Amino acid sequence: MTAPPLWVRSRTELRRSRRRRAHSCWDHLILAPLWPKHGVNLGTLLRTCDAVGACLAVPRLRWVPEALDRGNTLRKPTCVHWVNDPLTWLDTQRADSDVLGVELADEAVRLADLAPARRRTVVVLGHESDGIPADATALLHRAVEIPMLGTGLSLNVAVAGSLVAYKLAGLV
Ligand SMILES: C[S@@+](CC[C@H](N)C(=O)[O-])C[C@H]1O[C@@H](n2cnc3c(N)ncnc32)[C@H](O)[C@@H]1O
């Protein structure tokens, strides 16, 4: 017996099942690539934010607005928080949020053991070459690591951030 063919949803069907308007601010899950190097990763993370119902927190650097505009292939923009000074901002977030670093670290929990976020969570992502700066690791409450089997030292930052965001949102 052959399985029935997949009904791949059309763009019109997909659109009907999505929100009509962008959410102004989710303020529950915040992806924070605070030391970005490549604009393309910000665009990818912005799309993940829209998909999982999260905000993006980015530093107020001159090139970032244009990178977000270029990377934003969504019909409606998602919520972006502008950060003046990453360390001061992170320190402020600690008061009412779980500040979770996504990093390859001895103390990190494995992604499989990460539970969906029950309280406001800030997900801190590192620089593409240097990771999360040492003075920022002191401001993390905890860290999560995505296990790897191959020869590569690390994942692309937007891939790592997206995997963690899906887990925290409880969508996988
Ligand atoms: C390309 S990695 C940083 C480079 C890394 N320190 C190295 O030496 O290869 C950029 C960022 O992606 C995230 N990342 C990449 N792979 C990861 C993994 N397997 N587990 C957790 N975070 C990861 C972290 O936030 C990291 O700071």
Image (cartoon, helix red, strand yellow):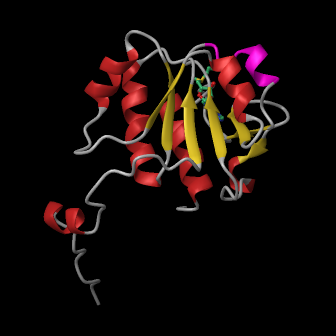
Answer whether residue 156 is visible to the viewer in this image: no
Above-or-below relation of 84 to 76: above
In magenta stretch: residue 143: no
Where does ligand 1 appear, by image quarter?
A: top right
Q: Quadrant of the C terminus?
A: bottom right
Magenta range: 130-138
In magenta stretch: residue 131: yes
Above-or-below relation of 56 to 139: below
Q: From the top left corner, tell me how far across and down residue 147 is, in percent.
A: 68, 41
Q: Which residue does the image show at 37% across and 42% down from the upper left?
A: 78
Q: From the top left corner, tell me how far across and down residue 103 is, in percent.
A: 69, 31
Q: Which residue does the image show at 81% across and 37% down from the upper left?
A: 141
Q: From the top left corner, tell me how far across and down residue 89 is, in percent.
A: 66, 24
Front one among 144 and 25: 25
Q: Which residue does the image show at 22% across and 74% down from the upper left?
A: 7
Above-or-below relation of 107 to 65: below
Front one among 158 and 141: 141
Q: From the top left corner, tell me how far across and down residue 13 is, in percent.
A: 19, 69
Front one among 41 and 96: 96
Q: Which residue does the image show at 70% across and 15% down from the upper left?
A: 133
